[in-house]
Image (cartoon, grey):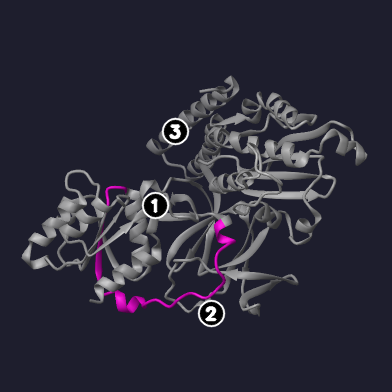
Amino acid sequence: MRMSTEKVDDLFNAVGETVLHSGRLGALLNGEPDVDEIEEELAHGGALMEELQHSVIQMRTLPLSSITGTLPRAVRDLAATQGKRVELAITGAETQLDRVILDGISESISHLLSNAVVHGIETPAERLGAGKPESGRIELHGDQRGSLVAIEVSDDGRGVARELIGSEDGAGALADTLTRAGFSTAEEVTEVAGRGVGLDAVKSHVESLGGGLEVMSEPGGGTTVTMLLPLTLALMRVLVFECGGQTLGLPLTSVDEAIVVRETMSLGGREAIEVRGRSIPLADLPGVISDGDPDNQPHAMVVASSGRRVALLCDRIVEEQEVVIKSLGPLLAGIPGHLGAAIMQSGRIALILDPAFVTKAPGRGRPQAASAAERHQFTVMVVDDQFTVRELQRSILEAAGYEVRTARGGREALAGIEGVELVVTDVQMPEMDGIELLRAIRENRERASLPVVMVTSQGGEEDRRRGLEAGADAYIVKDQFDQRALIETVERLLAR
């Protein structure tokens, strides 16, 4: 692990202070308790925890300079093959990023530099004709902006065609145009240009990290591409809210403001609200089911990402929290729109939404689902050995109005299956897997007709055949899994 001794010393000092604080607090509790002293120590403990947290985050970070050493030569070599002269200037190289992010963006930076050399910088003759120096200039710059880190690649080349800039509104919209699948400004396909995949790959990678991509360009004056990235993937400050009975979160950096919706208007067949004289389209989250009347949802958050702004409706805004982001695991990894999940203080799971996904969500107008009153009589059991997956499925079903029991494996499920009217189970589990559980259910005369839904990452034809032969009523593969598909499958099986 590469890190400065200062970071290690800071962490060591923070741990030492925390140990001393624990001893002082223990002495107070074992003696004559003084409420004021205990409150003072607890407040001091909170400050120490923040210091310890900061030290741990710093140990996960590395400077941008750790991946830029080979870039100047790579740019010179590429420029030579293109018959161009290019100088690369690197500034803000001391900017710190999470080492996981840093390892992943090295290729993205190379893509942007390649685009600048091939598409941006003109040949020496063209530059002289335009009144520019023969040698082009590219700058790679890093700086921290609050909880985000901006990595900019700018050039003084020809810029984007005026007709493209004129048709787009904002840096995010221009980025969308230039990152459309197959889009390229190159006149012919070569080894380094013309395939229309470079900038698209960069945008996809940045958004997968919870960031955004912006492009600004001036015809004849150059182009600046900015990657906005989170400082760390481990901790994130989010705005927690409730929608359709589910607890969700959005990165606070993407929320411009929270408002009360008093009236809406219709623009082009899509509902919108007016915020300080500007119309903002309303968006609903796909797959989030609410039993309430959508017209009675007075709260909304104005979410911004990649130059887009939408007002996201919600039932209730809870609070602002700093949370630890957890992976959704292999089963749910393919579901778009989520940065991960966080475990709340109550023990419930909150999905953390991807702002880029939210701003592209469809306009308001949810399909009607069966009411909770029609579902509360049913009890569903969720069986999965992964806590995160189990809790997510439980929250989805409870939000839809079902009574839910959970089990960590087949044996535990069989022990508590009395009174259950449907089972949702994973396939791969220790001791007794989903197939064995299914066979045990079918072999019992009293519950042989119990509906069983298999939800698994095993998507091959052989795996599907095994599940159906064992008697599964439905088989949902992770690539096709979403909240509404699960609810619709459960509704259909319980209505038989």
- In this rendering, the answer to whether 345 lies above or below 20 is below
What residue would you read off at disc 3? Answer: 22
Task: Say whether residue 416 is visible.
Answer: no
Viewer-nearest of discs 1 and 3: 1
Give the left or right position of residue 165, taking residue 242 as reference: right
- For marks 3 and 2, give the one nearer the viewer: 2
Q: Quadrant of residue 180?
A: bottom right
Front residue of this view, candidates 123 and 95: 123
Q: Position of residue 471 (x, y in %)?
A: 17, 61
Q: What element carries label 2?
A: helix
Q: What residue type is labelled 3?
A: Ser
Residue where numbered disc 2 is placed: 295
What residue appears at the point 25 percent right and 71 percent down from the top-left corner? 493
- Within-10-Å neighbours for mark 2: few <14, some 14–19, many 20+: few
In the image, residue 205 lies at what x, y percent? 56, 44
**Which region is colored magenta?**
357-386
Q: Nearer the viewer, residue 435 or 142?
A: 435
User: In this view of the protein, which residue sits in the foreground, 318 or 355?
Assistant: 355
Tell me which amino acid carries mark 1. Leu
